[in-house]
Image: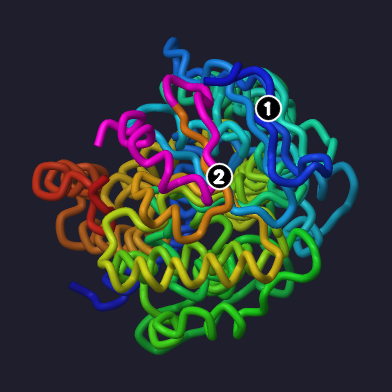
Amino acid sequence: MADARSPHPSAAQSPALLAVRDLNAWYDESHVLQGMAFDVHQGEVVTLLGRNGAGKTTTLRAIMGILPRRTGSIRLQGQELIGLPARAIARAGLAYCPEERGIFASLSVVENLMLPPVVRPGGLSRDAVLAMFPNLRERLGSQGTRLSGGEQQMLAIGRILRTGAKFLLLDEPTEGLAPVIVQQIGRTLRDLKQQGFTIILVEQNFRFAAQVADRHYVVEQGRVIDEIRNSELNAKMDQLHAYLGV
Amino acid sequence: MPVQVLFGQLLLGLINGSFYALLSLGLAVIFGMLNVINFAHGAFYMVGAFLAWMALTYLGVNYWAALVLVPIVVAILGMIVERTMIARLAQLDHLYSLLLTFGLALMIQGVFRNFYGVSGLPYSIPGELAGGINLGFMFLPNYRAWVIVASIVVCTGTWLLIDKTRLGAYLRAATENPVLVGAFGINVPRLITLTYGFGVGLAALAGVLAAPIYSVNPDMGADLIIIVFAVVVIGGMGSILGAIATGFGLGIIEGLTKTFYPQGSSVVIFVIMAIVLLVKPAGLFGKVA
């Protein structure tokens, strides 16, 4: 087990795209993140693995600036994000897809798709998103929440691809979905990686995580307790089972 | 019963309904976005009427210019109030902002009462809209027809703005989940300020429209706003179309009551409110939270 306050040695030796250090966060009185520290490099897919309540979702929320109270340091290409409001963090090029998907009931599918403003050039066009998720094309006029769970997840991912942000924070995109949809989302994530996207993925399903990720951080009690390269995953399976309690 | 009386009361009902609709629309928009029950709404309506009177009396600004300028001025005042006061209470229980806006209403009314008394000031109908048309079965004053048309146009325009445009999509999304909308990079606090300004601007527009019909006096908003709150409760908090339809509908019902059972006309809206609250507490067009 490494010291959670210092980053683990990482694949690329170039400076990290995102460097999280000593990140603490609270919900009311409960101290959920207790010194999170990790790095994500350009073009990597990194997962946060851990049991329920370990602080994975909170980590994404803290990075996005949608928690009332957080301290420490979150640097994106050297720019400190910790004091910024969520809207400025989005404008800095981070795009967030929440666990509950966040599809708006009072908006149609196409309105949901077009809602996030473009923050920089180079995002996917509406047609490119619809080519990636053809199911959505038939349903553009429907109320957003009338879509199936899988379609809602595609919409939630598709709409942030339009913004031009190249750094995605995805919170359990496979949760509750049928295996065939999970496979489709897996293909999409590998596709995005090839296109140069950087992704932090929160996952319970480490078999899914193993198909798409370069590295895994194991989170427990609000801090990173281990880092596993995807290539070491099989060798470390017993240890991972112990961490996750499965 | 003479048909002229019936149509006369129906017309009066439509006029009242025009004001109910404009005011409850603003309240509904503000409530949806800010979760604030804006008790100062009647005061902004009254300020709208007074600013039109003051602009004409002191500066010679005519009705048509006032119709455009006064809502803008009041919207700016409203945005200052939202930024400097209401926004500070956003994290607290909604009761606090309700008390704040109630206190503001009392202060604004008090100031105008102090300077202008309560007897009311006349504002004459603009020359272009003087007179009326004889429809055969009734006499339709031009100004009253104009008020109804203006209210319908403004209400429809507001509904289209909220339901069909990108800005409206931001508003609806931020009403549902402001945190996520902020995480997309949209400036939600600014959206809230603009919404409050827009809502009270609508109230001021209603005030300017009302100036030539009712006498301009400091209590005009307080008298009206109680009924408008009942309209909003009947229509359902936060429903845009509900606020518009209920506003006009209740105005007409009130007019009909005046014709057939005059004694009941001042309470009919509250009786309907009580029944709706018992049968469908979320309001006729409201969604159950």
Disc ID at residue B27: none
Residue A7: mark in rendering: 1
Circle 2 residue = A229
Q: Is residue B273 visible?
A: yes
Q: Position of residue B4 (x, y in %)?
A: 31, 76
Residue at point 50% right, 67% down? A112
Q: Is residue A195 left or right of residue B139?
A: right
Label 2 crowd bin: few (<14), some (14–19), many (20+), radius 10 Å: some
Q: Residues within 10 Å of mark 1 (few under 14, many from 20)?
A: some
Which residue is rendered at x = 69% and y = 48% of the image? A90
| Residue A240 within the segment the image draws in magenta | yes
* Image spot of residue B139 (x, y percent): 45, 78
How many angstroms separate mark 2 from mark 1 (CA)?
14 Å
Left or right position of B207 against A211:
right
Compared with residue A115, is residue A245 higher up or lower down, i.e. above or below? above
State the image quarter where residue A117 is shown.
Answer: bottom right
Instruction: Reply above or below: B186 against A228.
Output: below
Q: Residue at x 71, y 65 (%)?
A: A196
Label 1: chain? A
Query: Magenta residues?
Result: A220-246
Residue furthest to the top: A29
Q: Position of residue A229 (x, y in %)?
A: 55, 44
